[in-house]
Amino acid sequence: MINLEIPKKFVPLVGQAHQVAEEVFRPISRKYDQEEHAYPKELDMLAALIDGMNDGSDLGGAGAAGVRRTDNGDGGVRNGSNMSTVLGIIELCWGDVGLLLSMPRQGLGNSAIASVANDEQLERFRGKWAAMAITEPEAGSDSAAIRTTAVLDEETGEYVLNGEKIYVTSGERADLVVVWATLDRNVGRAAIKSFVVERSNPGLKLDRLEHKLGIRASDTAAFILDDCRVPKENLLGSPEVDTRKGFAGVMQTFDNTRPLVAGMAVGLTRACLELTERLLREAGVEVDYDRPAASQSAAAAEYLAMEADYEAARLLTLEAAWMADNSKPNSLQASMAKAKAGRTCVDVALRCVRLCGSLGFGEELLLEKWARDAKILDLFEGTQQIQLLIIARQLLGKSSAELK
Ligand SMILES: Cc1cc2nc3c(=O)[nH]c(=O)nc-3n(C[C@H](O)[C@H](O)[C@H](O)COP(=O)(O)OP(=O)(O)OC[C@H]3O[C@@H](n4cnc5c(N)ncnc54)[C@H](O)[C@@H]3O)c2cc1C
């Protein structure tokens, strides 16, 4: 039987995350949108609180740090860290996406570590804030084209990394940066591995911080890796180049992180819908769930259509997270969730701005900001077009070489 209710054990988490979104994020949302690159210091206290609660806590699962696939052994159905994290993220992004991305120790790099690190690495990197650096000036959507190299120095037992990384979320503020680099550019995608680099490493040079359309509370950094030496124990996963497995090791991260980004989009979409519903109601437009949309006002009918899209995005997102928790291959569902939720979020945010007219466009309310914040959710962790490509490949049984 399918049970679509929030698992009972996660109800307190959802409540706490919502409270944080409402009482901490929303009040400072506009401030850090206007003061781009200023560090939201209010989050330090929040992070400390979460750290204090982390063992067995509820809100500890609200960021990206928790996602890991573990076998529950008994073959039963479970709701684990992927589900709790997505549920927490939905609530927090109802508050503010940029601030969620700025939460200390909850970066997408943490999720990469949680997904593929061995037990020793998990212990060593525990409690650190990790950013994720895949994108390069010549490699965005096509992450297999990255040029950053990693060469093993047998004498010192270190990898030496050289290259350029751009658009690294939390790159300036994090303690660690998980860097994708190739061990051998001639071998192709199988040689791409991820390396944990300390932010203080002198070979990791901050080049600049980007100015952006939305999520302006979140810092986005560009780095030069200049003979950047990292201990060989910092390679995540296996150092072997296995051409049969191809990209599998590093790509596994996306199966866990795409549902999280979809969750961000779901939360932001709900924020737009709730505010729009209130403004419509105040303007005398009642949405009636007992009457066909065609017999209601155009605004109410449009609202109902948007809500249907929101529900579809939410259910796909929960499905993808649930599959990750239950050790089921979820690449297809993760991409479906990300594609649907990202597109819905952009679409709904812009339609809400239109429906609310000048109230939607002005800075008095947050709708105009949400419309700007929405766009990134359809871009990073794979654009809309790339998700559709992945879905098509999976459904048609084609490889990435066969369908580009
Ligand atoms: C604010 C922000 C934060 C980011 N954070 C991170 C981060 O933390 N870590 C990180 O590694 N990266 C990050 N990124 C990078 C992000 O993941 C990339 O921007 C994204 O992967 C797209 O790459 P690109 O910008 O090079 O666009 P391109 O790959 O050049 O794509 C341009 C356009 O072409 C389309 N396109 C490309 N290939 C195809 C195809 N085969 N078929 C159809 N259409 C195609 C794309 O969908 C897109 O519309 C961030 C980006 C931004 C803007």
Image (tube, rainbow, N blue to C red):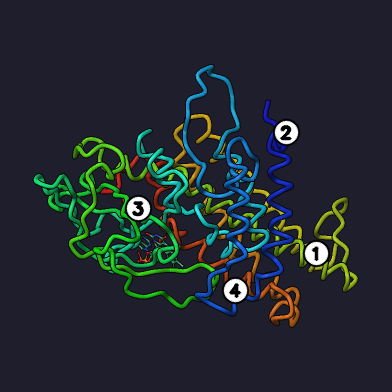
Residue denoted by label 2? 8
Placement of 372 over or under 135, stated as above or below? below
Q: Quadrant of ligand 1?
A: bottom left
Cα–Cα span, label 2 and label 3: 34 Å
Counting residues from the start of the chain, the first of labels 1 and 4 encountered is 4
Amino acid residing under circle 4: Tyr
Circle 4 packing at 10 Å, graded few (<14), some (14-19), many (20+), is: some
Q: CA distance from mark 2 to mark 4?
A: 34 Å
Q: Are marks 4 and 3 in contact (CB under 8 Å)?
A: no
Q: Looking at numbered disc 1 in the image, what kind of residue is underneath it?
A: Glu
- Give percent across and percent down for residue 125: 40, 45
Compared across the picture, whether 178 is left or right of 368 comes to left
Kindly state the secondary structure of the residue where label 3 is placed.
strand
Q: Mark 3, residues whose alpha carbon is within 10 Å: few (<14), some, or many (≥20)? A: many
- Could you tell me how far apart the alpha carbons at marks 1 and 2 are, in whole angstroms? 28 Å
Mark 2, mark 3: which one is toward the viewer?
A: 3
Q: Nearer the viewer, mark 3 or mark 1?
A: 3
Dot 4 corresponds to which residue? 32
Going by the numbered disc 3, the residue's amino acid type is Val
Q: Secondary structure at mark 2?
A: helix
| Label 3 within 8 A of ligand 1 by Cβ | no
Q: Cα distance, mark 3 to mark 1?
A: 41 Å
Estimate the x, y position of residue 107 in percent, counting from the top left.
47, 54
Name the spot of residue 195 as percent of width and height, x first.
Answer: 29, 49
Relative depth, front residue between 5 and 204: 204
The residue to which callout 1 is attached is: 277
Whether the residues at callouts 2 and 4 have beta carbons within 8 Å, the answer is no
Residue designated by label 3 = 178
Alpha-carbon span between mark 1 and mark 4 = 26 Å
Q: Of marks 2 and 3, which one's residue comes earlier in the chain?
A: 2
